Amino acid sequence: MNLILLHPKDQWIDPSNVRLSDDRFLHLRNVLHADVGQLVHVGVVGGRIGEGLVTSVDQNGVCLRIRLSLLPPPRHRLDLIIALPRPKMLRRIFRTVAEFGVSNLHLINSARVEKSYWQTPLLSSNKVHDALCAGLSRSSDTILPQIHFHRRFRPFVEDELADLCGGRPCWLADHGAPMALTMTASVPSVVMVGPEGGFVPFEISLAESVIAQRAHLGQRILSVDTAVTSVLAQTL
């Protein structure tokens, strides 16, 4: 953890003092070897970043006196729309969008998305929250990305996509596109990333008929989680 992330539901003694007794306590004790008087990097979910002064440590927990003075880092200029990937990729993708400071991630259905993917426990609110917090802790951020679910492709594209973009360009990642994403996404934009094998031709045509424009990520064919990282890294 590069940032000890604090939550409103934590054991707050008063507005400036908190006691931790979970995995964050174990990290402070076993990894950072925190002792009384030591300062650690902290932040409150949805709020500011600052320092925590260790005021006491025992076998069951640690107490911190919190002083917050810094704003979280700026948001990434992209919002993402991703066809729901295989469950084993989900946690990595949630962490990645949190690390890059994405404001909104929309998970959508697609012809190549297996129906069973929507049943994975990794989509439960607790699992999603834990994965996002892991990304925030790594990147020293406190603002959780908003995750949105859309289980029907055509109604999403026809009824919601243009409004979601709100006047911003919408780029659809397609290996056969004539232009590169790096040449197009210099302003706040929305990027669509398909499933393994990409969006089918009907889906591409429908998205183009509404608002989307195709752009490629390079010569190589990428897995979904690698494509997400590439999109966000190319457009920082």
Image (cartoon, grey):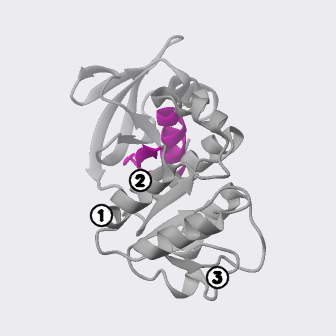
Answer left or right for 213 relative to 143: right
Residue closer to the observer: 55 or 221? 221
Counting residues from the start of the chain, the first of labels 3 and 1 encountered is 1
User: Residue, x 43% and y 37% (percent of image)?
Assistant: 5
Point out the frontmost of discs 3 and 2: 2
Counting residues from the start of the chain, the first of labels 1 and 2 encountered is 2
Q: Position of residue 187 (x, y in %)?
A: 39, 80
Q: Position of residue 55 (x, y in %)?
A: 37, 25
Residue at the spot of label 2: 155
Q: Give the range drawn in magenta.
A: 128-150
Counting residues from the start of the chain, the first of labels 3 and 2 encountered is 2
Quadrant of res 9:
top left
Q: Where is residue 57 in the image (x, y as percent from the top left)?
A: 47, 19
User: Hey, what amino acid is under mark 3?
Assistant: Ala
User: Residue, x 47% and y 34% (percent of image)?
Assistant: 129
Q: Do callouts 1 and 2 mark residues in contact (Cβ within 8 Å)?
A: no
Report how far apart the C-alphas of labels 3 and 1 lie in the structure.
Answer: 24 Å
User: Residue, x 61% and y 30% (percent of image)?
Assistant: 120
Q: Position of residue 14 (x, y in %)?
A: 21, 22
- Mark count: 3
Q: In this view, does 47 lie above or below 17?
A: below
* Disc ID at residue 163: 1
Quadrant of res 115:
top right
Q: In this view, does 87 lie above or below 139?
A: above
Residue closer to the observer: 224 or 61? 224
User: Hey, what amino acid is under mark 1?
Assistant: Asp
Outermost residue, right side = 220
User: Residue, x 36% and y 64% (percent of image)?
Assistant: 74
Q: Is residue 6 above or below residue 109?
A: above
Mark 2 lies on a secondary structure that is helix
* Disc ID at residue 177: 3
Residue closer to the observer: 84 or 203? 203
